[in-house]
Amino acid sequence: MSFRKVVSLACGFAGGSAVLVCAAVAADNHGYFGERCRFRKTLAAVHAAQPSAWPTANGWDYNWDKREPSSMVNGKRKESAGDSGNPDGENNKPKATRYICLIRHSQYNLKGDGDKERVLTPLGREQAEFTGQRLAALGLKYDVLIHSSMTRATETANIISKYLPGVELESCDLLREGAPIEPVPPVTHWKPEAAYHEDGARIEAAFRRYIHRADAKQKEDSYEIIVCHANVIRYFVCRALQFPPEGWLRMGLNNGSITWLTIRPSGRVGLRSLGDSGFMPPDKLSRT
């Protein structure tokens, strides 16, 4: 197989599964690509944000969030249980499904000097109103509304919250915008490696805090809203679906858009897009 075909298979967003990437890593370890092959840089980028292990041979790592029930049991207690079964394992089984709405902030003033001046534009405020109306119209009982501490995300969340009375608001610094991992294919503008190293660790920490299956103590399904940024959401989606995380820049998100992640008790993850709030007219869309 030619080098070009291997790379296209391994890195393709639609056709390149994590299994193929694993195969490519193994081939590289055996010297298939040669010492000076550019694919080595791709492999380095894949590991830059220190994600969890690649999926297992069957194509899906059920312990991707380190909450698979059998992994939550003390090994020594498991052995002592013997033939009597493993009550701890049963107690650690999640029963509820988590529905997570990832919302990109609305349009903001790109010319602002620093975060405090990058406030929402009049169009951005209108976009947030539409998004709030859409979430309210779904008729769901939301548990919490978490938002990035950056100004544009905070303002977006505050407008949305008007349509969701009684839903608790929480601010989180981990959700701030950044460069999660060096993208493949590479971007034309240069960023120092330190930027990816620092931002990537923070955004990966945010993923581990918020994107996981329900706790075993959770009895009912939950509906949670996270208002943050395009780079953060795209990285979350790649990680949750176990796609190569360096492919995050291959997706686009409009301002005020809703991306819906469903995390089942089994650890299966599904993706659904509700589009640009569902209420937003075409002339109100923007990506800035």
Image (spheres, rainbow, N blue to C red):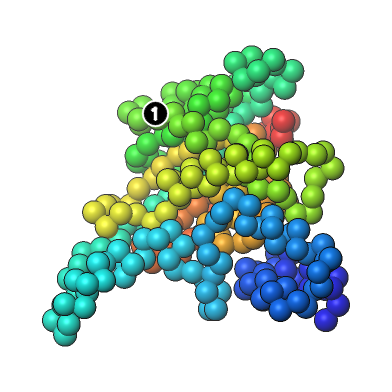
Q: Mark 1 — residue? A: 169
Q: Residue furthest left?
A: 84
258 or 240, which lies in front?
A: 240
**Quadrant assignment for the C terminus:** top right
Task: Name the residue: 17% across, 82% down.
Answer: 82
Above or below, comparing residue 140 to residue 76 in the picture: above
Q: Quadrant of residue 109?
A: top right
Residue 26 to residue 99: above or below: below
Please tell me whether residue 167 is drawn above or below residue 202 in the rendered image: above
Q: x, y percentage for residue 282?
A: 71, 35
Please determine whether, in this image, residue 204 is positioned above or below residue 281: below
Q: Is residue 177 left or right of residue 83?
A: right
Is residue 131 in view from this perspective? Answer: no
The residue shown at (75%, 71%) is 9
Q: Residue at x 43, y 66 (%)?
A: 63
Give the structural element (helix, strand or loop) at label 1: strand
Q: Is residue 94 left or right of residue 53?
A: left
- Residue 8 placed where, x, y %? 79, 68
Name the one closer to the observer, 24 or 110.
24
